[in-house]
Amino acid sequence: MTALPAASEPLRVDIWSDIACPWCYVGKRRFETALEGFAGRDAVEVVWHAFELDPSAPVEETRKMRDILGSKYGQGAAGAQAMLDNMTQTAAAEGLEYPFERLVPTNTFDAHRVIHLAAHEGKQDAMKERLLAAYFTEGKHVGSRDTLATLAAEVGLDGAAVRAALDTDAGAAEVRQDQTQARAYGISGVPFFVLGGKYGVSGAQPAEVLRGALEQLWGELNPAPLTMLSPVAGAGAAEGCEDGSCAVPEKTVPERTAAEQV
């Protein structure tokens, strides 16, 4: 039997998330786990998009995360701490450290701009990872433009150029476009995964759920190849047929007599 090769179409995954979203870092890890062992992983193209959980957040925030959550959800300090403790355990299961007592709450608009600037250099995923680690694990102030320039340099960008760009509106239009598209999709929470522009997956779903979605779309983009069966001996004995496959015979033109020739 002979198997015909299947097409290998790229699979684009667009992910909306926020630097200040603890579930977004967990979702990134789970998606990376989903890619492990996925047959089409080399054809997956990941594009990160901006989403601000709180666009009104100040760049310089004096309150700690526990106080912010307690006020936001009306659960008080004890309730907020319980939420943070649960999130810390969830992150730890994915190999992530969340020392919330060191976290510096801030506005993330400029951080999203830097991610778009990094995309032009082919370093978008590296920049996204660096910012998440800096915010959640290292307690860095990712709302500071000087800090952002330093982090950009650490992933191979020109730190001075990034710092200068942040004093302009570079990347702002792309961030706002991401937010416009999120509203068009009806995205109200992150992380949010859009697979092939066709399927949406909301939340930091388990790795097996994300892998299942990838495999479903991959199967649609790359159907199973046809398998050619060997012909049965003696089949197709009629004239013009061979090995069970009939071909259109070539048309023969009889020779004309001298009288018929012009």
Image (tube, rainbow, N blue to C red):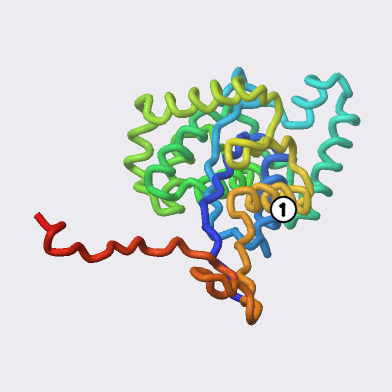
Position of the C terminus by quadrant: bottom left
Q: Give the amino acid type for the residue marked by disc 1 in the picture.
A: Arg
Residue 20 x/y as whole percent: 65, 35
Residue where numbered disc 1 is placed: 211
Looking at the image, which residue sits at the far bottom?
Answer: 233
* Depth check, front residue: 188 or 199: 199
In the drawing, does residue 190 fall left or right of residue 90?
A: left
**Figure check: 141 above or below 260:** above
Residue under the image location 52 percent in, 58 percent down? 7
* Name of the residue lying farthest toward the left: 262
Q: Is residue 181 shown left or right of residue 233?
A: left
From the top left corner, tell me how far across and down residue 108 is, in percent: 56, 30
What residue is shown at x 60% (from left), y 18% (from top)?
56
Of helix, strand and loop, which one carries label 1?
helix
The quarter of the picture where the N terminus appears is bottom right
Q: Quadrant of residue 159?
A: top left
